[in-house]
Image (cartoon, rainbow, N blue to C red):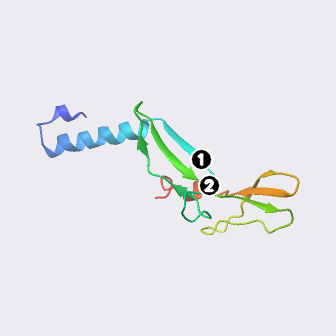
Amino acid sequence: MKPGDFPIGSPESRAAARAQLTHWRDSRERIEIISHIPRGKDDSRIRFGAWQDCPDGKLLRLVYVPLVWLKRGEAIPACPDCRTPFKKAGESVNMVGYQANCLKMHDPDRIA
């Protein structure tokens, strides 16, 4: 069904146009930029930005994933929202980095 299959302005043509736009938006390539740099808000929680239209037709969003560096032996942090323990992301001589491990659980596109 295409909007042109129905009279201009009819409920059917509007519904067909909405369906086309939804399909077009859902089928576009999506790019997520994952950042561990806090941006002035609560830096202990995962945050998803809104999808932005790129000039090349792709969709882009920024996602903040908490990353903390702790001294060896300190308690492994957990997500304050779902209590999932952070996973080990790196280490240095005296420090261990942990990042949130529950990104998919909090993704607003997956929650329905």
x then y, percent, for residue 110? 51, 53
Residue found farthest to the right: 93
Image quadrant containing the N terminus: top left
In depth, the one of 48 and 35 nearer the eye is 35
Amino acid beneath label 1? Ile
Task: Specify the label residue 65 is tagged with.
Answer: 2
Q: Residue at x 52, y 48 (%)?
A: 62
In this rendering, the answer to whether 98 lies above or below 52 is: below
- Residue 76, by quadrant, is bottom right
Q: Is residue 81 above or below residue 64?
A: below
Disc 1 secondary structure class = strand
Q: Residue at x 60, y 62 (%)?
A: 43
**Residue corresponding to mark 1:** 34
> Mark 2: which amino acid?
Val
* Residue 38 point in image, percent of width and height: 59, 57
Of 14 and 30, the residue lying toward us: 30
Query: Which residue is outermost to the front?
Result: 40
Is residue 4 toward the left or the right of residue 60 in the image?
left
Residue depicted at 63% across the width and 69% down the height: 80
> How many dots with numbers?
2
**Residue 21 figure quarter:** top left
Give neighbour class at mark 2: few <14, some 14-19, many 20+ (Cα, 10 Å). Answer: many
What element does badge 2 sit on?
A: loop
Q: Position of residue 111 (x, y in %)?
A: 49, 58
| Occupied quadrant, residue 98 | bottom right
Estimate how packed mark 1 is, as few (under 14), some (14 to 19) or many (20 or more) residues with alpha carbons within 10 Å: few
Q: CA distance from mark 1 to mark 2?
A: 7 Å
Contact check, label 1 and label 2, Cβ < 8 Å? yes
- Indicate whether 4 appears above or below 39: above
